[in-house]
Image (spheres, rainbow, N blue to C red):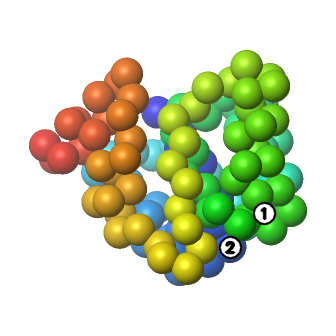
Amino acid sequence: MKIVLAHSDRNYTNTLKIFFLNKGVTNIHVFSDGFNALTHIIKNRSHIVIIEETLPGLNAADIKKALVFKHIKPEIVIVKSFNNMSPSKVLSKIKTEFNLNKQILEN
């Protein structure tokens, strides 16, 4: 499972990263700007992308458009800049074919 956390608030991404690490997910990459996040997603075909709506460089809408153009379809959760979701709320928005939500909630 490849997860990208793209948010300008390092405390928030650290909180999410620790949450997913505690649930057994180890392939987590953190970015604070849209350009680097998009490059990584395209190159590594990430499964889940949790991204800040107004991320610097490229925002969430820009990244989503680029991924559609490239025919890359990760699960995307967009987080509002002013209202960061709790890790469990983010998790509840993920609905992957890997049943990550169920798998993590059971741990």
Query: Residue at point 73% right, 19% down?
Result: 71
Which SS class for mark 1? loop
Please say if the residues under marks 2 and 1 sit with CB atoms less than 8 Å apart.
yes
Q: Is residue 23 visible?
A: yes
Q: Position of residue 15 (x, y in %)?
A: 43, 71
> Disc 2 residue type?
Ser
Q: Which residue is mark 1?
A: 33
Q: Position of residue 106 (x, y in %)?
A: 13, 43
Q: Residue furthest left?
A: 106
State whether residue 22 is above or below residue 62.
below
Q: Quadrant of residue 33?
A: bottom right
> Disc 1 residue type?
Asp
User: Could you tell which of marks 2 and 1 lies nearer the N-terminus?
Assistant: 2
Q: Which residue is mark 2?
A: 8
Query: Residue at point 35% right, 63% down?
Result: 87
Q: Quadrant of residue 63?
A: top right
32 relative position to 15: left or right: right
Measure how far apart labels 2 and 1 are at the Cα level. Answer: 7 Å
Which SS class for mark 2? loop
Q: Position of residue 42 (x, y in %)?
A: 76, 32
